[in-house]
Image (spheres, helix red, strand yellow):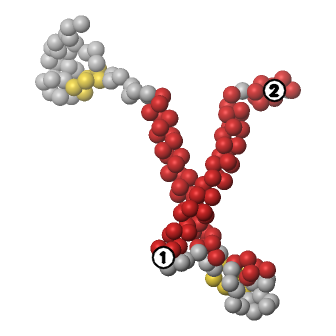
Amino acid sequence: MLNDFKDFAVKGNVIDMAVGIIVGAAFTTVVKSLVDDLLMPPLGVILGNVDFSDKFVLLKDGTPAPPYVSVDAAKKAGATVLSYGQFINAVVSFLIVAFVLFLVVRWITKLRGQAPPPPTTKDCPFCLSTIALGAKRCPKCTSQLEAKAV
């Protein structure tokens, strides 16, 4: 059983997955910084000096009573808040991660040079039905097909 576990642990798939998780965690940190530090501040300025991270709806007052200047201040006062601004930041982060992953997968696919599989069928030149690539006679219209010169 120990040998089976060792075989499983040292297979390429497990190690590839571990590397992927580590790179993904580092990538998440970079994307979070991109969204919080580079994208959201200009977007906030364009929308009238709005800081999305501190946008919230007060559901229940805390002690001391409102107004609260930030989500953190409201939470420290024991208030119940709906932090929709942080959710907006998370959605923007997700969209950026998804788009970048799409670009990476597309780029890797191009690097691999995966050509489409060769055709296995062709069209009959007489009745235009689909026939096997090596057919010498069309099964639909029974026309004799010309052999291609090699």
Q: Residue beneath label 1, please?
A: 47
Q: Estimate the x, y position of residue 60 in percent, counting from the top left.
A: 72, 87
Q: Quadrant of the N terminus?
A: top right
SS under mark 1: loop
Instruction: Depth check: give the residue in front, 40 or 130.
Output: 40
Q: In the rendered view, does 97 fall on the left or right side of 106?
A: right
Q: Quadrant of residue 9?
A: top right
Q: Earlier in the sequence, mark 1 or mark 2?
A: 2
Residue 105 vs 127, above or below: the answer is below
- Classed neighbour count for the residue bearing mark 1: other residues with Cα under 10 Å, few (<14), some (14–19), many (≥20): few
Q: Estimate the x, y position of residue 130 in percent, counting from the top left.
A: 25, 27
Residue at the spot 53% in from the left edge and 57% down from the top edge: 95
Residue 84 visible in rendering: no
SS under mark 2: helix
Residue at the spot 25% in from the left edge and 15% down from the top edge: 135
Residue 2 visible in rendering: yes
Residue at the spot 67% in from the left edge and 48% down from the top edge: 26
Q: Residue beneath label 2, please?
A: 6
Q: In the rendered view, does 136 fall on the left or right side of 46?
A: left
Instruction: Depth check: give the residue in front, 53 or 146.
Output: 53
